[in-house]
Image (cartoon, grey):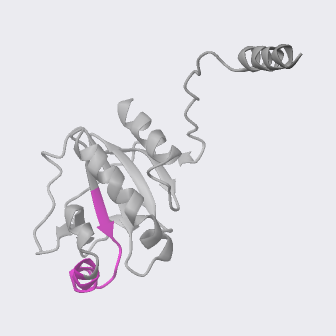
Amino acid sequence: MMRIAISGFLAVLLVAAPVSRAAAPVDLSEWHAEYTGTAIDYSELLTLDGHSVDRDGMGQSVVVHFWATWCKPCIKEMPTMLALTRRLASQGITVLWVSMDRGGATDVTPFLDKNPELAKAMVVVEGKTPLSKKLAIRIVPTTIIDRNGKEVRRLIGSGEWDGDQGVELAELLKR
């Protein structure tokens, strides 16, 4: 009797269990497309030592991540964004971390000194004509996908870059 009950239970499990799982469709509903086609001018961005940023050599796709040292959601998402930065770098995709701190390198450098793991990220600051203003960035963090110097999509607010949003971003970069 016990053998029949166990056999029946296993049969139910086998029938109910999926044989294979198809990949879930990527949900891009959080990725805003209303800015698609906006030109991204990197000429006003500066490295921490004051040199201009050159878009040439960054590859076809660039992820532009706006953040600030005073932004708690930005700081909270940094470990996952850093993991994404490393993962995309292995695919030849640059993640540019654009600090919106008004003090520029004066504000950012001490923050980076306290967070040495971020030294591996390509951190830049805004110049006299902020890129964030040109791109109408009002909330940090905001992440923009750039393909060939034009905005493709943006995510406003923080992300879980080692989860679904990282998958969504990778999918956008493949298109």
Residue 172 appears in the rendering = yes
Above/below status of 129 relative to 11 = below
**Range covered by the magenta-colored residues:** 96-113
**Rendering coords of residue 44 (x, y %):** 22, 66
Quarter holding residue 131: bottom left
**Rendering coords of residue 120 (x, y %):** 20, 62
Q: Is residue 117 left or right of residue 8?
A: left
Q: Is residue 175 left or right of residue 104?
A: right
Split into 4 quadrants, where in the image is the N terminus? top right
Q: How many marks?
A: 0
Quarter holding residue 57: top left
Q: Residue at 18% across / 51% down in the picture?
A: 55
Q: Is residue 15 magenta?
A: no
Give 64 or 84, whichever is nearer the viewer: 84
Give 101 or 135, whichever is nearer the viewer: 101
Q: Residue at 85% across / 20% down in the picture?
A: 2
**Rendering coords of residue 153 (x, y %):** 45, 45
Q: Residue at 11% across / 75% down in the picture?
A: 49
* Most distant residue in the right direction: 1
Give 11 or 51, whichever is nearer the viewer: 11
Split into 4 quadrants, where in the image is the C terminus? top left
Residue 136 appears in the rendering = no
**Rendering coords of residue 66 (x, y %):** 38, 64
Give 40 or 85, whichever is nearer the viewer: 85
Q: Is residue 104 magenta?
A: yes
Q: Is residue 126 left or right of residue 73?
A: left
